Image (tube, rainbow, N blue to C red):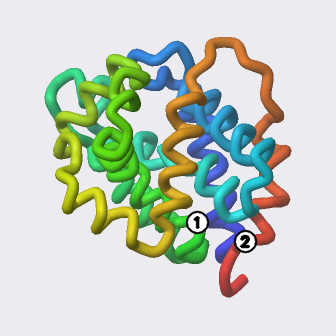
Amino acid sequence: MKNSSVHSILEILSTKGHEQYGTEAVSQLEHALQCATLAKTSNATPELITASLLHDFGHLVHNLGEDAAERGIDDRHEYRALNYLKTIFSDAVTEPIRMHVNAKRYLCAANKDYWDSLSPASKTSLELQGGIFTEAEATEFINQPYAEDAVKLRMWDDLAKVKNLKTPGLEYFVPVIKKLIINS
């Protein structure tokens, strides 16, 4: 059962992933592969590599269209992904995914230069997602389990938007993903 769920997730990623990643220069799949590759080359855990690959899966499973943020809609993709992933993977995979949007809010509060590094699309979505954390919110966020992993994921997420960047294909990450299936 769990293997078929993983197969369904990979099928959605490989088919719907060819859609443009909003106004970024890459597709959803290219973005996912770049993010996972950055995690892999940073010697991240298999769980964080998998989270990096699947962090924007929620964008692929809603019917709000690719331009939801441009229309002023927060698609809450970090939560939409969890419906598919929580029964398959441990918290070490799902929590950084759930927290990666708030990691952007945290980084803007913790590092004043971070805002300037964001793409225009990421700045637009940040406002829809609640804006920059207050100092108290930032402290509360970073003290949660998996927050530091979510911050790492967020940093790779920001860098994973390079047009025509060569990365390993989706099949490269399948063995990593399959080893992490819980209760298989």
In this view of the protein, which residue sits in the foreground, 166 or 106? 106
Q: Are marks 2 and 1 in contact (CB under 8 Å)?
A: yes
x 68%, y 57%: residue: 7
> On the image, which quarter does residue 147 sit in?
bottom left
Residue type (three-letter) at the residue carrying disc 2:
Leu
Q: Tell me how far mark 2 sits from mark 1, CA to CA.
A: 9 Å
The relative height of residue 1 versus residue 48 in the rendered view (above or below) is below
x 19%, y 40%: residue: 131
**Placement of the C terminus among the 4 image quadrants:** bottom right
**Residue pointed to by mark 2:** 180
Q: Secondary structure at mark 2?
A: loop
**Residue pointed to by mark 1:** 93
The relative height of residue 8 versus residue 36 in the rendered view (above or below) is below
Q: Is residue 13 left or right of residue 69?
A: right
* Residue 91 in the image, given as x and y percentages of width and height: 53, 75
Residue type (three-letter) at the residue carrying disc 1:
Val
x 59%, y 56%: residue: 51
